[in-house]
Image: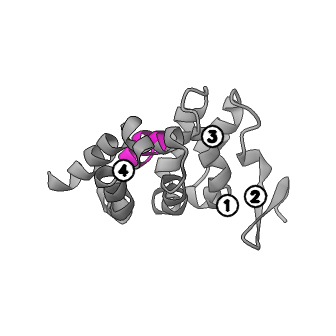
């Protein structure tokens, strides 16, 4: 176990996470500053918990966390795909606008099936929340 760590179990896999890397509340800018100083590979175990902080982009630390998540590049893709499959339309929107749109094109292409589904076969709620338009906007990066 890591020093100052917590053990997290997902799908039967036990992962040690440095608890200092998980914000304690929506005003925890101290942890955000610590996160900014970490190499992306050190954040990998904490990515699921960090993505939870962009469920409401209006939280004071959310946009900073989104930038950090985008900087993790390829390592963020698994969590992004999970979020895009949820029914939490706000979370999906923030993920698209504040993380996916900041990824390099060569990584966004790995999300193309998920983006195309939202863009061209949106659920009623995805359409109401304009996720289809956001997904099409991101996909348009490939036609330029």
Mark 3, residue position: 53
State left or right for residue 53 relative to residue 3: left
Mark 2, residue position: 17
The quarter of the picture where residue 99 lies is: top left
Closer to the camera, 92 or 39?
Answer: 92
Closer to the camera, 44 or 33?
Answer: 44
Mark 4, residue position: 122
Label 4, residues with CA under 10 Å away: few <14, some 14-19, many ≥20: some
Task: Find residue 73 and report its horizontal and vertical position in percent.
Answer: 46, 57
Marks 4 and 2, how far apart at CA: 35 Å
Closer to the chain start, of discs 4 and 2, is 2
Task: Find residue 54 and report its horizontal and vertical position in percent.
Answer: 57, 39
Quadrant in the picture for the N terminus? bottom right
Task: Find residue 122 and report its horizontal and vertical position in percent.
Answer: 36, 50
Closer to the camera, 38 or 122?
Answer: 122
Closer to the chain start, of discs 4 and 3, is 3
The span shown in magenta is 93-103
Closer to the chain start, of discs 4 and 1, is 1
- Residue 45's label in the rendered image is 1
Residue visible at 50% across and 42% down in the picture: 89
Numbered disc in front, either 3 or 1: 3
Closer to the chain start, of discs 2 and 3, is 2
> Do tag 4 and tag 2 residues touch (Cβ < 8 Å)?
no
Numbered disc in front, either 4 or 3: 4
Marks 4 and 1, how far apart at CA: 31 Å
């Amino acid at each position: 176990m890591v020093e100052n760590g917590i053990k997290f179990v997902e799908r039967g896999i036990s992962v040690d996470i440095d608890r200092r890397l998980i914000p304690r509340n929506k005003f925890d800018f101290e942890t955000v500053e610590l996160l900014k100083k970490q190499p992306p590979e050190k954040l990998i175990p904490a990515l699921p918990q960090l993505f939870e902080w962009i469920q409401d982009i209006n939280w004071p630390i959310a946009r900073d966390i989104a930038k950090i998540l985008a900087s993790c590049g390829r390592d963020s893709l698994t969590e992004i795909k999970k979020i895009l499959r949820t029914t939490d339309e706000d979370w999906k929107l923030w993920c698209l606008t504040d993380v996916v749109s900041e990824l390099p094109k060569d990584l966004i292409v790995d999300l193309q099936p998920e983006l195309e589904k939202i863009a061209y076969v949106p659920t009623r709620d995805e359409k109401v929340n304009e996720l289809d338009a956001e997904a099409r906007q991101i996909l348009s990066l490939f036609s330029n």
